[in-house]
Image: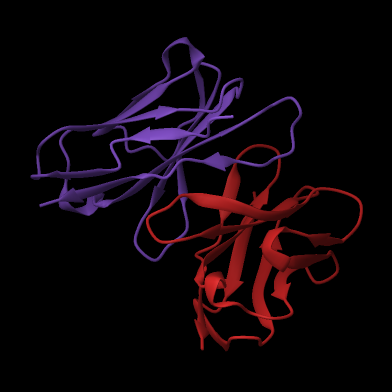
Chain colours: A purple, B red
């Protein structure tokens, strides 16, 4: 079974440029998460989807960040414009509601460097 | 709301020594508790989890953890450290909705 796939793995951009990250969850997983991981810290939730609905986006900085999950499968996280402080790893994870074991399955992450 | 505190951002042990990584949680509902491991430039991989039932749970790579409700703890242990155990370890708690992670503990294993 394929795991969570993220792309790109690495991205270097100049500040004020836009950037987008893509995530393909495990087949059949209804719930999809985007987490932000700063260097030396634990993941912090940005947004959680159940199917195509964003059920928790309270931590998403909506002035520059946006996300979508069309058709309830793949998801895209966008930053526009990027700032120096956005340099971090963006992790995508997915989980199944049935059965609900609570476990999250993570992709390898997309590492963003903003210059 | 749930939260996790990991005591010690960095733990160093000798190869063959006991590994003990500490985690305390706060949750308003019966928690699901997890330990994840992260190797450099990789995503998080589940080591073990506690949902219900037996409070001592065994995971991969010889790790285990014990859920102690009275102490609100879920410490991770391994009897004998191996060089390949060097990584970042995250404790996490899940309640009704999302999962909250601790800040992580970096484990170093000395030869």
Which of A21/A2 is in front? Answer: A2
In the image, farthest residue toward the top: A71
* A29 sits left or right of B56 in the view: left
Which of A4/A81 is in front? Answer: A4
* A104 sits left or right of A54 in the view: right
Vertical placement of residue A37 versus B110, above or below:
above
* B59 sits left or right of A40 in the view: right
Which of A57/B55 is in front? Answer: B55
Which of A72/A55 is in front? Answer: A72
- Residue appearing at x 65%, y 86% in the figure: B16
- Residue appearing at x 79%, y 61% in the figure: B58
Vertical placement of residue B59 versus A82, above or below:
below
Quadrant of image for the N terminus of chain A: top right
- Residue appearing at x 66%, y 69% in the figure: B23
Q: Position of residue B74 (x, y in %)?
A: 74, 66
Vertical placement of residue B52 versus B66, above or below:
above
Q: Position of residue A47 (x, y in %)?
A: 46, 34
Query: What is the number of callouts on the image?
Result: 0
- Residue appearing at x 80%, y 72% in the figure: B71
Q: Position of residue A41 (x, y in %)?
A: 42, 62
Q: Is residue B105 visible?
A: yes
Vertical placement of residue A96 versus A93, above or below:
above
Q: Position of residue B99 (x, y in %)?
A: 60, 45
Q: Is residue A79 visible?
A: no
């Amino acid at each position: 079974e394929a795991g969570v796939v993220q792309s790109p793995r690495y991205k270097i951009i100049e500040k004020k440029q836009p950037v987008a990250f893509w995530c393909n969850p495990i087949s059949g997983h209804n719930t999809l998460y985007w987490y932000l991981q700063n260097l030396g810290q634990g993941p912090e939730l940005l947004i959680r989807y159940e199917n195509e609905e964003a059920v928790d986006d309270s931590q998403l900085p909506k002035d520059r960040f946006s996300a979508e999950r069309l058709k309830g499968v793949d998801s895209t996280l966008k930053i526009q414009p990027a700032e120096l402080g956005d340099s971090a790893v963006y992790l995508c994870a997915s989980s199944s509601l049935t059965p609900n074991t609570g476990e999250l399955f993570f992709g390898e992450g997309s590492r963003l460097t903003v210059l | 709301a749930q939260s996790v505190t990991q005591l010690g951002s960095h733990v160093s042990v000798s190869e063959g020594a006991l590994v003990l990584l500490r985690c305390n949680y706060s949750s308003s509902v019966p928690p699901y508790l997890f330990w994840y491991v992260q190797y450099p430039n990789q995503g998080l991989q589940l080591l073990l989890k506690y949902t219900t039932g037996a409070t001592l749970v065994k995971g991969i790579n010889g790790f285990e953890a014990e859920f102690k409700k009275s102490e609100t703890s879920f410490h991770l242990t391994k009897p004998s450290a191996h060089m390949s155990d060097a990584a970042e370890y995250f404790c996490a708690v899940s309640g009704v909705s999302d999962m909250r992670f601790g800040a992580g503990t970096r484990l170093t294993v000395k030869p």
